[in-house]
Amino acid sequence: MLGDGVYCSSLPMRPGLRELVIAIVDDAAPVCEALEGLLRSEGFTAQSFACAEDFLASDCGRDAGCLILDVRLPGMSGLQLQQHLAAIGWRIPIVFITAQEDADGQILAQALRAGATACLHKPFGDRELLTVVRSVFPR
């Protein structure tokens, strides 16, 4: 755990990810806008999507170096997208974000067992997110 509400696994990452896009999938436009702005201000390239299906239909999927993914989405959920990506062989670091109550930790545990890099509870701080995102990319 990196801080309040930040849970990380020790998933090894492939080199050279800094040049790749950070994809954000969240159905709340203000969240997407804020995260894109924060990531771009730190020198990352970011692109957001309102749902999992839009992300999958985009050209961004194969180029994404990291995926910031809401747990609860319209249509395919974040956990379902994680499972789908694994099934088609797309290995991508996933940082889950959620405002959903998870009192017993089952959702977070499931996401981490399936290979998620981290899980953050909304509202989280800029520093928390940047710490996790930077941990994905080699120094």
Image (cartoon, rainbow, N blue to C red):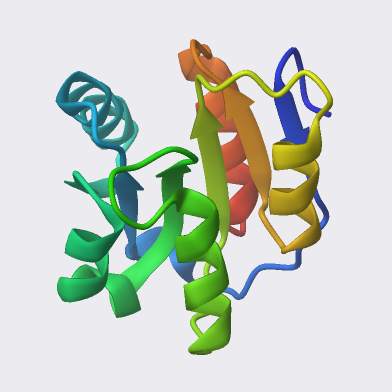
Q: Give the vertical position of 46 relative to 101 (above or below).
A: below
Judge left or right: residue 112 versus residue 124. right
Nearest the camera: 138 or 105?
Answer: 105
Report how many numbered discs are placed on residues in the image: 0
Judge left or right: residue 4 versus residue 94. right
> Measuring 51% from the left and 33% from the top, which residue is drawn there?
97
Q: Give the vertical position of 34 relative to 53 (above or below).
A: above
x, y percentage for residue 33? 17, 27
> Measuring 83% from the left and 29% from the top, which residue is drawn there?
1
Judge left or right: residue 27 versus residue 71. left
Q: Give the vertical position of 33 relative to 61 (above or below).
A: above
x, y percentage for residue 126? 46, 16
Q: Quarter-wise, where is residue 34 in the image? A: top left
x, y percentage for residue 88? 48, 89
Nearest the camera: 33 or 131?
Answer: 33
> Measuring 55% from the left and 85% from the top, which residue is drawn there?
87
x, y percentage for residue 10? 83, 55
* Residue found at the very far bottom of the displayed protein: 88
Q: Give the vertical position of 91 relative to 132 (above or below).
A: below
Q: Quadrant location of the C terminus?
A: bottom right
Asked if residue 44 can be seen in this view, the reply is no
